[in-house]
Amino acid sequence: MQLTSSFKLVFLKQMLRGFLLSDASSNSMSFHERKNAIKLSADAAIAFARGRTRWSQGLITNLSKNEKNKEILKSLLGREYDNLRKPCGNSLKIPRSKKILRRCLRMCSRRKKAGRAQHICKSILAKALAKKRIQVLKKLVPGGESMDGFSLLDETLDYAMSLKAQVDVMRRLLKTSKASLNIKQMKAWGQGGLDFTAGGHL
Amino acid sequence: MEKERFFGGGWKSAHAGLLPEVSAFAGDEHLPHSFVGFGWEQPVHGQEAHAQQLESALSSLVSSPSSNAPDGNDSVVIRELIGRLGSICNSGNVSPSSRCHSAHASYYSTPLSSPPKLNLAGADHQRQRMLVNQVAAAPFLADQGFAERAARFSCFGAAEAGQLSRVSSRQSLAKEVAASYAMMAGSSSSPEASSASEKLTAVVAEHNARKRKAAPKGKGKAAAPSSSSAMDPPEASPKIESFIDASKLCELIPLPQEENSDSKRCKAAEAGGADKDAPVKPKTEQNSSDDGNAKPPEPPKDYIHVRARRGQATDSHSLAERVRREKISERMKLLQDLVPGCNKVTGKAVMLDEIINYVQSLQRQVEFLSMKLATLDPQLEFDTETLLSKEMHQVHVPLPQQVLFPLDMATSAFSLAQLPLKLAENPPDSMFSSLQLPPIDHLANLWEDDLRYVVQTGFPQSQEAPFSSGALRAE
């Protein structure tokens, strides 16, 4: 639904822009720096292409923490930078109040289930396991700390799909770049061969 | 006065026999007024009055058997009801058909003021069976007028499905109507009527189940099996008993999705769901999640109707918890579809594990790919830049990089971006051949030119040289 080719195009375009803006291809950078620059443009591009979602905002915020990247991001994203950077206002308050509410509910419901000890143990255990995993997921998804259960799952879904698109496009770009490199090489050899033979065929 | 209207309305002559019985039905004066007045009111008077009278007629019809002694009156009442419903269609067909439909939409939407929830199951069975037999024996059922009206029922029944779906559920009323339609269908010998009644009951059952999205397609499903099963009229009589039973009513509807929740809802309606909520376990969660996932996702509304199922607590806390759980399980299902190889996995924790693994693997892939892109020869990256700049030149745009992009980003990037995607769509081994014979000419030129001048200029260290050479090439 979301992985349309237009989405991928937008992403690719932005990524290439980012490559240029961040000077990703010049020899002046070390390998590591280049890789980071590429990753930065890729992430910024995918966040831009997706539009305004929680995870994209979180992503841009995380990326902007590095001062160097801020300039690049600003020029890359333009207007969208401010939109994407600013997360929703109540994002922190809602989970906090919900946590309190849930704690109260849990205490109430536990009092009701006082007689069924075994069930409580199982349920508590299961909930603890799920809780742990949700915490891990929160760390994975950018901007996930300030989300509650449902929206976290929603954002995870969205984020996973966008990641898939990102991987897809980058892989294709890699493939075609490699292919063109090979062709270039072949042509170079071919040219060299022709020059060598000093044939005037061209 | 009503008698005059009766004749003036052009009612079928076969039903003239109804009139003396109506006048004989003096025991309950409330009934004749509502019946007769309803039946011959002109559509001009407004569908709401129409609808409300029908509704009050129905409610009084159902409540009256308890008050009236003779069963003969009941048969009259039933006939009146049939006549009433027929007149709806008549008037509906006389005026534009949409009015008929809107009448029924409004009929369903008018809130039931007086009658309490009435179950036609159980105690009413016998009476209804007798009614049905009597009605079957009545001569006027054999005439074509009834068949015609029955045919019209099917038309408005079919058309109503879409509109009914918009209305909030009114289980009891809908059941009454369905049962009364079912009675009529059972008594008639026309296959259309039974199919219409089955469609209607299907529609009503869907209506009960509040499956708004599933209603149109469920109707389609119901129509097919109901039409197939309605082909044999002799089987109508055994169907009557089953139709009349309200709980079985739900089960008969051949909608695989909704059977569970339908039967559950019927039971809930009857039993009233009194038990306390069982303690929440992930396994029971899966059960409820399976039931919850039988429903399509609720359309966004101001508030969500939640009905307590049988055997579950009805206080607001557990209801809210259940809504929350169902939402979560819905999303888990979606994620299950997304994450490959997750179909066999059940259980929240394991699913979350899979999702975490998947997201982590995707992130790692991005890192790896960016690393690979970085390891490519810088000239290659540069390749794309020159491609971009070449496009820029072709459209006569000034040289500086930062200025280039806002202007012709769309055209250039599109053609550029199309190229890798197009090429990448072919399998890798045919990559070279595809580069030789690209599908689009100008893209081919793009690659060719670029490769040529990059090769000619060698591997420049700075960015100015290829631009200048590119500028030279363009001119």
Image (cartoon, helix red, strand yellow):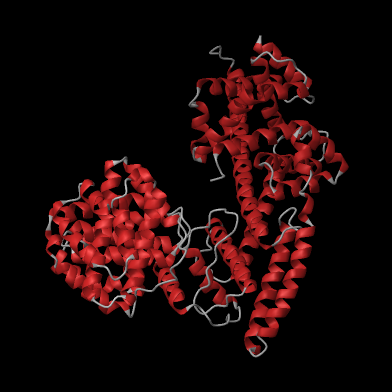
Q: Is residue B253 visible?
A: no
Residue B270 falls left or right of residue B239? right
Residue B254 falls left or right of residue A39? left
Residue B4: % across, % down: 23, 50
Q: Quadrant of residue B412?
A: top right
Q: Quadrant of residue A68?
A: top right
Residue A31: % across, % down: 79, 42
Q: Along the line of sight, which residue is nearer the eye, B104 or A35? A: B104
Q: Residue at x 56, y 73 (%)?
A: B285
Q: Along the line of sight, which residue is nearer the eye, A200 or B23? A: B23
Residue A54 falls left or right of residue B451? right
Residue B420: % across, % down: 58, 33
Q: Residue at x 73, y 26 (%)?
A: B459
Q: Residue furthest top?
A: B475
Residue B110 falls left or right of residue B472? left
Q: Residue furthest front?
A: B1
Q: Along the line of sight, which residue is nearer the eye, A98 or B80? A: B80
Residue B13: % across, % down: 14, 52
Q: Residue at x 53, y 81 (%)?
A: B274
Q: Quadrant of residue B262?
A: bottom left
Q: Is residue B234 visible?
A: yes
